[in-house]
Image: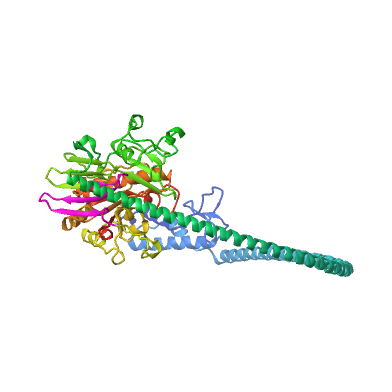
Amino acid sequence: MKKFLKSTTSLSISIALAMPTAGFAQAEAVSCGPTKEQVEFPCALKSGDLIESKKDLREARKALRQALKAAKDSGAAITEDMMEAVEEPSDEAMDQDAVDQAAADQAAADQAAADQAAADQAAADQAADDQAAADQAVADQAAADQAVADQAAADQAAADQAAADQAAADQAAADQAAADQAAADQAAADLAAANAAADVEAQAALEAQLAEEAAAAEAALDAQAATDAQTAEAAAVEEALREERRAARREERRAERQAEREAAAAAAAEADAGTATATVVTEEVTADEVRTSDEEFDTSVASRSAAAAPATAAATATAPAAAPAEDSGLSKFEKALLLGLGAVVVGSVLKNGDKIVSRSGDRVVVQDPNGDLRVLKDDDALIRRPGDEVRTETFSDGSSRSTVVKPDGSKIVTIRARDGSVLRRVNVDPQGREYVLFDDTIVEEQEIVVNELPQIEQRFASVGTQSEDALRAALEMQSAVPQNRTFSLRQVREINQVRSLAPELELDAVRFQTGSAAILPEQARSLARIGGTLRELIRQDPRTVILVEGHTDAVGDATYNLALSDRRAETVALALTEYFNVPPENMITQGYGESALKIPTLASEAANRRAVVRNITGLLR
């Protein structure tokens, strides 16, 4: 850098750079000139730079002097121009400049003061205007507030006047209402007085009328009491006569049944002695002749409404059974009934006074003179199985004895009354041991007074999920039989209070479809526990007798339901034999129709279409 500044050119450049730079070059500007002359600003240096004031000029020259000094120190050549450029202006010039500058500054200050005074005056004027406007606004607001206050006072005065007017009107209305009420009260008082007088007269008339009516009613009551007494006496007499007739009829029927039992027993004894006259039929049972539990019956049940016979047929129904026309189209069972009872036509009256109201080939429903229904059927149908040999002896009184010989050599000997009901059954095992299951031929039926029997609360116990031990305990439960009292099989079958002495078990797994007497194999297999229990019970005591009951709901004709329920009982017994080898000879089946509803309803109810088993052994001996 020092070597570079040794040259004149470098010094000039350095001095020029040290000078203050102007914002722009002005060709017409005067030269800053000799130092002793008065300098006008702006002026231009020889380098062309423009100087605006003395201050700038002094600073430029100061910078040049510093540059010049540096040049001297470095031994560089110094020119006259360079020396002139760094000379200071004269004191006079500087003083004049100061005076001019002061004058200019004073003028500027004066102008600024004048401007400030003018601005202050304008601000004062504006403030005065603003204050005047504010004062006017306050005055206007005060006037407006006064106007609102005046209007409010006027409104309040009007309201007060209106309230005073309303109060006056209300008082006038109250006065009028009081006057009206007083008038109404007076009118009511007048009316009450008039009514009271009328009521006294009416009460007197009413009391007189009531007294008259009471006398008439008392007379009528006396007359009615006398009539009722006569009617009650007549009814009592009539009821006594009816009861006497019923008692006589019961005694007559009991005597008839006893005679039938004795005749059947005597006929069987004579047959054993070889002195009886009997028709003997021997046959072998085939599979086509028996039904299984999952099959419906071949015939449908007909009721009195569907199979009512003509009057002529009913009139001739008591004709001898040998008439060929009446024998046409009858089942074996009906032919046997025709021989024993004298008729099988619906509507006919039998020898014992019962009336036939339904028949279906395998079953006949009769109605006794008291209106009770009873189903007749072949009780041996259950014990005849394919491969059995059956020997049937039919005696002259219509009773019969059948001997069913099983393939293993065992025998079932059954004596039946002339109506087909079973009287005696004996089971003979392959070793020749005899077991009497029941024997109504030697039992003298005692008259049953229902009210004297133990009162048993009706309970619906079901097989459900009970174990075989629990089922066995239920079946072996002691029957509520009075001491030294036994019943005939007929009494157990026909009298509910007797039958109820033996606990029941409902086979809740079996539910029949409406109108059906068949059960499906899966339902039959659900009887496994009760089937095994019954089989074991009979094995331990071969004299055990089980009653299988069938029941229906209340939909349909009572006679139809009775026959259908009896078929259902037979179906359940068949299933117990088919699937679980329960001996059929130890089971008695009986249908009860709608007479023992589990749920008391006339509607279709599956719970009423059920089957029940009872161990009736204790009732028979």
Residue 83 place in picture, x, y as percent:
44, 59
Front-most of residues 307 and 476: 307
Classify 380 as above or below 436.
Answer: above
Residue 98 place in picture, x, y as percent:
59, 66
Residue 170 place in picture, x, y as percent:
86, 68
| First to last magenta residue range | 414-443
Residue 58 horizontal side relative to residue 476, left or right: right
For the N terminus, the image quarter is: bottom left
Front-most of residues 431 and 21: 431
> Is 440 in the magenta?
yes
Residue 599 horizontal side relative to residue 160, left or right: left
Residue 547 horizontal side relative to residue 315, left or right: left
Residue 357, picture quadrant: top left
Q: Is residue 543 visible?
A: yes
Q: Residue at the left extreme?
A: 431
Q: How is the image coloured?
A: rainbow
Q: Is residue 170 visible?
A: no
Name the residue located 44 percent from the left edge and 52 percent from the top edge: 601
> Is 421 in the magenta?
yes
